[in-house]
Image (cartoon, rainbow, N blue to C red):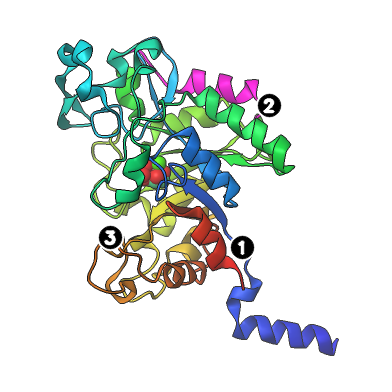
Amino acid sequence: MLKTLFAAALLAVIPSLAMAEPIIIAHRGASGERPEHTLAGYERAIDQGADYIEPDLVLTKDGVLVVRHENEIGGTTDVAAHPEFADRKTTKTIDGTQITGWFTEDFTLAELRTLRARERLPEVRTANRRFDGLYQVPTFEEVLKLIEAKNAETRRRIGVYPETKHPSYFASIGLPHEAPLLAMLERFGYVSADDPVFIQSFEVDNLKALRTKTRLRLVQLVASAEGPADQKSLQYADMLTLEGMKQIAAYADAIGAEGTLIVNSDGSDTGFVARAHEAGLQVHMWTLRAENMFLPPSMKRGDDPAAHGDFAGAVRAIVATGVDGIFSDFPGLARAALKP
Ligand code: G3P
Ligand code: CA
């Protein structure tokens, strides 16, 4: 009895002891150390102890799910150096924004596979430039095969955390994500809420449609500004009251929130996580990066924006809110920061 009372008192004084450790989600792979969304980046993340790897998904002209952060691929591949694709450069309006470049939906998978990935932030992540030109754009199927192989190698069950990118835009051009996504997940045995899968989206209607078709866990992504591209009159702020969160909980299992919604710039808790938990939602925070330029002022170290700041301190501040998951470009450092 005394022991129980002592433990309860201790947990009240040190709340973090009462919390389960958050899952670590490798944001676009170990993208601080390898070009994002490459099999090499995902494998490094798994080897560093990530619980989940995160592929952002877009589609090719022939309807194949491939892994890129956006459908415009000029920023993360060498497509501009391919004269045979010069005439594919075009201007489109995607989610209300005019964008000029090359788009996955204008390439067959075979054409896309002739390209090679490049580091998105070459001025910041200069060491990653040495990998430019080495890796292909992966298919979602290849990511799931990699997980299957790493599960066998490590005897772990590594999770996958796919994001539908621009789902209403892709549906509008006859290339909806939902059917190929669920079919591919089912092929690899992912069907139930117990399976290590979270499907995420910044839009709303595709998640509601998925809810009617799958028991896999769903995540409503939210940002500190603007609103879902498919809900013209809705701002994310409107969705983040307790009532708004309860509405999200009717179709999603978790909320994926921008870090500034969860902790203030001085590292203090905004109360977001407690509100979401009251609404019945887990909270996964995006995105922790180690470089000074991405850290709040109190966690920067020195003047070099590309140098690492107090990343472990940033992880601790987030963990203290009771968050259930952390997206990071540096899953290995995040794992290390969680060690007592
Ligand atoms: O999906 C969580 C986080 O990845 C959202 O941001 O833009 O990196 O996909 P983004
Ligand atoms: Ca993402």
Is residue 189 on the magenta stretch? yes
Q: Which of marks 3 and 1 is nearer the N terminus?
A: 1
Is residue 334 in view from this perspective?
yes
**Residue numbers of the magenta segment:** 173-190
Q: Which of 294 and 267 is in front in this view?
A: 294
Q: What element carries label 1?
A: loop
Q: Is mark 3 on a helix, strand or loop?
A: loop
Amino acid type assigned to the residue bearing label 2 in the image: Gly
Residue count near mark 2 (Cα–Cα under 10 Å), binned few <14, some 14–19, many ≥20: few
Q: In this view, does 271 lie above or below 61?
A: below
Q: Where is residue 84 in the image (x, y as percent from the top left)?
A: 21, 11
Pointer 1: what residue? 21
Pointer 3: what residue? 306
| Quadrant assignment for the C terminus | bottom right
Label 3, label 1: how far apart the Cα atoms are:
29 Å
Label 1 within 8 A of ligand 1 by Cβ: no
Q: Where is residue 237 in the image (x, y as percent from the top left)?
A: 30, 54
